[in-house]
Image (cartoon, rainbow, N blue to C red):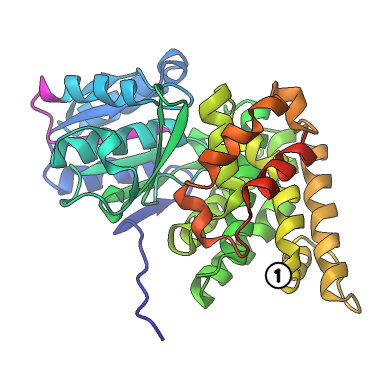
Amino acid sequence: MAAYKFFMPAVNLMGEGCLKEAVADIKSLGFSKALIVTDKPLVEIGLVSKVVEDLGAADITSLVFDGTQPNPTVGNVDAGLEMLKASDCDFIISLGGGSPHDCAKGIALVAANGGSIKDYEGVDQSAKPQMPLVAINTTAGTASEITRFCIITDEERHVKMAIVDKNTTPILSVNDPALMKDMPKSLTAATGMDALTHAVEAYVSIIATPVTDASALMAIELVEKYLRAAVADGDNMQAREKMAYAQLLAGMAFNNASLGYVHAMAHQLGGFYDLPHGVCNAILLPHVQEYNAQVSAARLKDVARAMGINVMGMSDDEGAKAALVAIRKLSADIGIPAGLAELGAKEEDFATLADNALKDACGFTNPKQPTHEEVCEIYKKAM
């Protein structure tokens, strides 16, 4: 049996109110000035100023870079890096969802290794650990606060680069559900389906292990039980906390078992059309898993069981079909668009999207490797 590596931040804080403890932990690490990488909406709602104030009370000063876009770009990384170089910050804080986390990882990685973030596309292309990064999470979906995945859009190629690198792992993650209660319903739905996608893809991955299986199945169970409630009522702190756990468990799974063609294909839609990642994942998930069921029906039957389906007496194929029905029902219940046509995708672009999807590092661990024609066909079915 091959040696197995498990990647995760050294310290992970969970639970309502844990931000206060995180500030104390940051202080104990000896850091004195942070570059906070975030986005303008979090500045506007006052969350950034609250974190700055909490840090200040612990004698930690900070500088704010709020130029992160929803699909962070090479330009965003470059702009944040320039601000970092002009400061005397000794660590970085990412504050937000997947976009600020990924942008901060890009900044931290290039700060330590030099060059351009484009140089690190692929798997483990860096030589040195990134600048110390603390990830404070405000959404329940991407799990970027604990992973070695960094997704950055190359504006010139209109491609989302998958950077999978052990050196992008934060040193500390913070999941305080109190920071998540103001998420809009649409964001709660999209990020929740992103978490489900992470768990399902990790579970059917060709490098899944008992550790990632356990994490993935519990994540699927929690998403099925609590995502609808979190979308319906943002102040439901039980649902918020359970979804925070779900997305972290899903992150533990895919951070170590990797992903598949849902992500490989969704990245291209996001890079080409600037579409929301979680929504693209949600639409593609049942279609890619229908393709994967040719070789992973038994595993998808387990997914159905985790989603509350009584699979007793079902064949593997029947169980896999039940999983697809459950996934589609959850998406519909929380208002996810039915197809890519609603997002503005165009069939004439599918050949280009497929070209790029076949190069995406996330697809390497899919249980069945599709041809270019098959990727195009999946896109068509998802319309």
Q: Residue at x 15, y 42 (%)?
A: 113
Q: Which residue is mark 1?
A: 295
In the rendered structure, does residue 89 fall within the stretch colored magenta?
Answer: yes
* Residue range highlighted in magenta: 85-97
Residue 17 coordinates in the image, percent (x, y):
43, 42
Name the amino acid type tagged 1. Val
Q: Nearer the viewer, residue 236 or 116?
A: 116
Q: Quadrant of the C terminus?
A: top right
- Describe residue 39's horizontal placement relative to residue 63 as left or right: right
- Describe residue 376's horizontal placement relative to residue 179 as left or right: right
Q: Residue at x 82, y 38 (%)?
A: 332
Q: Residue at x 25, y 50 (%)?
A: 125
Q: Quadrant of the N terminus?
A: bottom left
- Residue extending farthest to the bottom is 1
Quadrant in which residue 337 is drawn: top right
As helix, strand or loop, the secondary structure at mark 1 comes to: helix
Q: Residue at x 89, y 75 (%)?
A: 314
Q: Nearer the viewer, residue 198 or 377?
A: 377
